[in-house]
Structures are given as structure tokens and as C-alpha cells.
Image: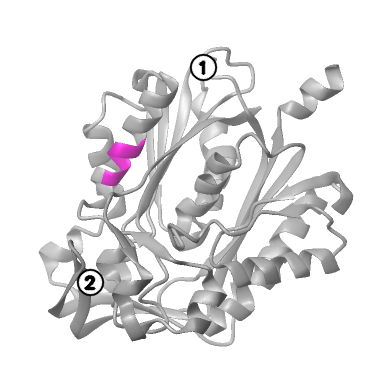
Amino acid sequence: MLGISAIAAYQPDWVLPNEWYDSLLSRKFVKHTGIEKRPISEEDEVALAVRAVQNLAAETGCDPGDCAAVVFVSPSFVPMCAARKLMDGPRARQEKLFRAAHRVVDELPMSPRVILANNAFCSGYARAMSIVLHKVQPSLELQQDEFILVITSSRISRITDFGCQQTGGLFGDMATATLVSRGDSKKYPVHFELIDSQFGKVPTQRPFFDFENRKDVLVPVPGGGRQTETERVVFSMDGMGIADIAPRAMAQAAAELAEANKLAPNDVQFVVPHQAGAAIVRLAGMKLEQAGFEAEVINGMTREVGNVSSGSVPFTLKHQWDRLRGNILCPVAAVGAPGKNEVSCGCILLRSTAIHAKTAA
């Protein structure tokens, strides 16, 4: 059995408030998302990831030398299929996610036997945990006092058009580091058992997401200023389309994972969904209620950080660490590959070790 022993996060100091956008953000946007400000990073994803792991070591005393595997997740790298079309050769090569994963390891005092990387956008954490359970664990021969690191690092600000009314205020930059250890580890005791994790894609009638080369792009500068970049590769997203499909996808993923693990809806105590925005989480909660779930649905985590994409579930788990008890479902939903008629979704099933302590008492 594997489980989560600890989670750390790193949030950049530069925070961009809603006031910076002036009339670019509508009242409807703010009400729908619940976002009031978001962190912006001047450092790249590798530096953010290193800082998160350093925070993990400082907060827990873990020895990076005990790291046996790293799964690096970043939603802000432009997939190579798009990078090759929109960028010259040297710039496109900088978007190679696997190379970034190795750079993270090289900057830390660790020598993992396995290094993997993935970009499933906002579904990245569920996909990473699926990889840990179904790919890494069976072949790694993880020792009792070794651990696996799942690192999320998001710098979506570098691919954002801040002048876009739909997407300019959505995302915040952040990195997280999750320490996954064996259930019998005394050095790194498990707080949440990792019971199961699934990830998949669902076909849609049209694409919701792509990348493009856009001219005269509005971007922020430290100190509250603005400037215009002559040209920038940015993402484009049908926000309303995703807002319609994501709640249903998350609810369905949660229900399917519960059923696969023979859990009735009333066996689930908490749902920690991807924090895409307050209204989307509320709608996901309504869909879950319709399926018979009575669990508490965690919401409202976007207020001071925005949508931190693949980092939102570990960020929420960290901040709700001592509240979460029993069986916990963590459903996610995200855009699919650029220009493809698809969305991705998944779910993680955790069980708090406190449930065993209560039973033993």
C-alpha cells in the first residue's frame, strides 16, 4: 500500500489583484470564479519545482536522498505538437517536459531511479497518481524508507493573454511537492492512503482548447504596471464550454471510481474537486448530490490563488489536511490535447489513516 505522507507548496511573492485588470474583468467573472487575486512567477517551472521540494524538506525533514522516483507534472509547457508549429527550433526544444524533469532532479540532492513527466493540464495530478500506482509501484521495488515525489509546477502566466476577458484572470502560478511513501514506512508515515486513481479522456463534439501566436499581448509587470508584448504564444480556451462540461465530468469520474472500489455514495465523507472556480465546484457538487453523494464538497480555494491547474488538488489537500477524514474523492477535469475534440478527467481515492485510529480506539 502507498499513501501521501506530506505535501508542500511554493507560491510566488508577486500577487496580481483583480484591481489590476480594471474593466477587463466583469462582475460575472469574479462571481463565477471566486478569484480575487493570483500569484505570478518571474521564475520558470524548474525553479518553482525546486522551491517546492526545498519547502517539503524544510517542513518535514525528509531526506531527498531517499527519493526513489520523481513524477513531474506541468500544465504550462506547450505540448510539442503545438510548439513545433508556433515556435522556432530552439524555443520549441525548451518545451520538452522530460528535459525539465531532469533539470529539477539535477538541481536537488537526489538520484531517483525513475524520472517521469506528464502534462494533462488540470487533470495532471490524477494522471500522475495513476502513473505512480499502476506504472511506477509495480516495477520500482520501493524500499520501506524510500519515497516517490509527485511534483506539480505551473507557470501559466507565461502563456496567458492578460487582456483576454475569458481567460486573462483565471490562472495563478504555483508549485507543489507530494511525498508518497509505503504504508509501513516509519520514517515517512502515511497520512492519506492512496487507494486508487484513474485518468481518461472523453470525446466531445468540438475542441475547447488550443494554442496560437497572438500579437500585441497585454502582460503585467512587477509593481502594478502593464506592458504589451509584440508577439506571444498563448493558450485559447472556450471557458463557457468547459464550465458546462467540467462539473458533469468530475461528478461522473468520482462516481465511477467509488463504484470501482465498491464504495456506496454514503461511504464517502469528503470530495476535494479540482478548484477550477467556485461556480464549477458548486455545479459539480449538485451533480454529485443527484448521484446520491452526501459528502462535504470542499470549495472556495481559488479566492487568493486562482485556478492553479494541476496543483489545485494537492494545494487543497494541504490546506484541509487536518479536517479530512474517512474516504476522500478528488475528481478533476481539464481540456484535452490542443485542437482535439476531447476533454480529460480523472479521480483519486484517498482514505485518511485517522479512520483506522478511530476504529482501533
Horizontal placement of 334 versus 209: left or right?
right
The residue lying toward the viewer, choosing from 334 and 91, is: 334
**Rendering coords of residue 121 (x, y %):** 45, 62
Q: Examine the rendering and report whether any part of residue 136 can be seen.
A: yes
Q: Examine the rendering and report whether any part of residue 164 can be seen.
A: no
Q: Which segment did they paint magenta?
A: 48-52
Residue holding disc 2: 84
Horizontal placement of 209 versus 282: left or right?
left
**Rendering coords of residue 108 (x, y %):** 26, 29
Residue type at mark 1: give it: Gln
Residue holding disc 1: 143
The residue lying toward the viewer, choosing from 181 and 223, is: 223
In the rendered view, tell whether residue 150 sits above or below residue 30. Answer: above
Residue 360 falls in image quadrant:
top right
Horizontal placement of 136 versus 79: left or right?
right
Q: SS at mark 2?
A: helix
| Mark 2 and mark 1 residues within 8 Å of each other at the beta carbon | no
**Rendering coords of residue 314 (x, y %):** 52, 45
